[in-house]
Image (cartoon, rainbow, N blue to C red):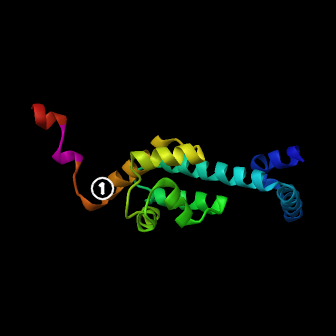
Amino acid sequence: MANNIELIGIQSNKIDKSETEIIKRIIDARSQSQSKDEIIENHMIGIKFSINKYLNDSITSEVVEAGEFLNDILKVYEIKKNRFAKYIGLSEPNLHALLKGRRKINNEIAKKIELIFKIDAQAWLYIETKNEIKKFNVNNNLKAKDYSIKELVG
């Protein structure tokens, strides 16, 4: 089975429709045999990958609020938002604002999320900083031609 799955990325342009169906059935069979913990772990790997990809994407890509990633995590674990808010010491309206991007994840919240979900606090803060820069760039017209070291020292 592993050999068939490994071929997906290597020979995807050479696989016909019937082979694709076989691969889908193999993947479906494997996913149906997973425990709830394995399913959660796989979803979390996907979320961590998405966070990493977002942080490594160019500064011009679309803004994804840190709260969107957190909301995905809460869904994976089936954690009610009011329970999570109470657990980390936030009011429900503040958590809702955080999930919608109207409130930022600060150091304390980032550390609590790290301790609970094992996603580095720095990652949450990097997302917030990246988003601030993206939003600044959209709303401001600062250009390299207007600010240069040659002009400054020249």
Residue drawn at x 77%, y 46% as measured from the top left: 10
Is 144 situated above or below 32?
Answer: above
Query: Picture coordinates of residue 24 (x, y %)?
Result: 84, 61
Residue at the image position 38 percent from the left and 54 percent from the top: 131
Magenta-tinted stretch: 144-148
Of residues 49 and 107, the one drawn nearer to the viewer in this rendering: 107
Q: In which quadrant of the rendered view does residue 21 lie?
A: bottom right
**Residue at 42% over, 46% down:** 108
Tell which of 4 and 116 is nearer to you.
116
Q: Secondary structure at mark 1?
A: helix
Q: How many marks?
A: 1
Task: Write down the residue under mark 1.
Answer: 137
Which amino acid type is marked by label 1? Asn
Note whether residue 148 is visible.
Answer: yes
**Lateral position of residue 10 relative to residue 83, left or right:** right
Residue extending farthest to the left is: 154
- Which quadrant holds residue 30? bottom right
Per the image, is 34 magenta? no
**Could you say which is closer to the camera, residue 64 or residue 72?**
72
Residue drawn at the location 12% of the way across and 35% of the way down: 152
Q: Position of residue 44 (x, y in %)?
A: 65, 51
Q: What secondary structure is the stretch in magenta mostly built from?
A: helix
The percent position of residue 35, horizontal first and vertical second, equals: 82, 54
